[in-house]
Image (spheres, helix red, strand yellow):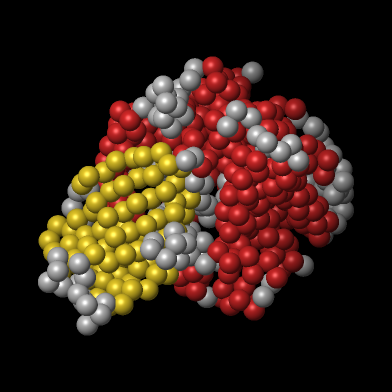
Amino acid sequence: MRLRTDYSILIFLLLIASVLSAWSVHAQAPQNPFSIGGLEGTGGRPTSGIAAFILGKQAEFTRAMTIAARALKSDWAALWSLLGLALSYGIFHAAGPGHGKAIVAAYVVANENALARGALVAGLAALLQGVVAVALVGTITILLGGTRQMMTSTINIIETVSYAAIALFGFWLLLRKLRSLWYLSRNQPEACDHVHMPGPDQVMRWSGRDAASAIFAAGLRPCSGAILILVFTASQGVLWAGIAAVAAMSIGTAMTTASIAACAVYFKAAAVKLASGSSVWAVWLIRGLEVLAALAVMTLGLLLLMGHWTSVGGA
Amino acid sequence: MLFRIILLVVGLFAMALPAQAHPHVFVAAKAEVIYDGDGNFLGVNHVWTFDEQYSAFATMGFPKLADGKLDPDKLAELAKVNVESLVDFGYFTAGKAAGKKLDFAEPQNYRLEFHGNALVLFMSLPLKKPVPGKTVTIDVSDPSFFVAFAFDDANDAVVLSRAPQGCTLSVKRPKESDLSNYARLSDQMFQALTNKSAVSDSFGNKAIIACP
């Protein structure tokens, strides 16, 4: 109980710090004049062939989706090409930038997770992203008849909250992992051959709260591509097609993130397997790995909040 | 053994690294390169046509007039906001004349129009001081790559106005067709993986003018 109070004070302080820093970010970093919202536009030109390929594909899909959405007004068959394009867009989009996959991967590493659970978290995060986009456009465009400024500033706020959520999620994971590390040091097993190692498939526990935090942190910020296709289809009077396209995009995104989650599960399982049966230091290694994963997520969230994305993580 | 574990750990973190930014806004650009008739380069008249998705986004919630056209006052307001915030981004226009960086003054005569389904920004960008225009390079692009600029496919995407006789003009657009080729895991791709500048260069959107 005591410990819980400490947590909430720390979390509260961190929240204040993040709001303050977010405030200064938006004061400092000028937003791209043609921005959709947030700081998504920072990063720089692609520096590798793979990144260039992903970019080129996305540009193609965006154009083709515009054409398909317009054709839909007179030709229903265009719906299938729109959905196919949206699915591919989602797959490529998730492979590109975005912090969603980093969080899902870190979540999987920091928790003893089975493949199916990692995939579920990835899928729900992608679903949440789609739902947020539909809710935003539905409320601002359809209900309020709002302008681009209203949309952009709303996305800015959501983005700030999502970055704070990432930092908090990482912070929370870190505390828990450090505690288990501390516990390990206090209960150092005698040099015997009964080192307690979680097996690759052994699931220690399934924390719904952990999963929910990961989903929230990874899926809160809507994707600009989804916002754009929704606003565009609404302007063409076929918003329902835009919603269908966003659903397809979410499925595509989930496919990519889930495969990254699967890789993370595999990597961790392999590391555990390699280390198991060797010695006590292997236990430390695994726990250390978890702490690192949590630390990485927290740092990512803080960097995003401070807007140092470009200089540190971008290019 | 230790090595294999380290390899796995590195792999795990590399996977989670963020990738680069990617464009959400596409602009087909046209440019008129202005000379003074005496071989001096004065500035650029831009015409930027935005993609339909962004055009719908930028004008959402704008009131329409009886004839179905967008309220011109709202468009004028938006043009002002756009142009004012373009200052922080160097008007997405960089370049050199006779080896020196171009220094642009504030844009003039800017306006937004709606053509078909597309928003079009007109903007005159004069240099602070006229410069000798023997060799001029004009790069129209967004370094953060959020907006993908490409000169229009039309032959008149870049035109010279009052330039001296015998000037040559070459237009370099970002090579999207090259990008599609990467899908075939061509030699180009492996080249690109090892040669960063080659990829960066294929995204360039430039007009190069050489006068006698």
Q: Residue at x 49, y 46 (%)?
A: B51
Quadrant in the rendering for residue A2: top right
Residue B200 is at least partly visible in this image: no
Residue B64 at what x, y percent from top left? 42, 24
Residue B188 at what x, y percent from top left? 61, 76
**Looking at the image, residue B172 lies above or below residue A120:** below
Q: Quadrant of the C terminus of chain B?
A: bottom left
Q: Nearer the viewer, residue B44 or A218?
A: B44
Most distant residue in the front direction: B67
Q: Residue at x 75, y 27 (%)?
A: A208
Q: Nearer the viewer, residue B84 or B55?
A: B55
Most distant residue in the bottom direction: B212
Residue A124 at what x, y percent from top left? 72, 33
Residue A229 is at least partly visible in this image: yes
**Looking at the image, residue A109 lies above or below residue B195:** above
Q: Quadrant of the N terminus of chain B?
A: bottom right
Q: Residue at x 87, y 46 (%)?
A: A201
Residue A188 at what x, y percent from top left? 74, 45
Q: Is residue A258 left or right of residue A54?
A: right
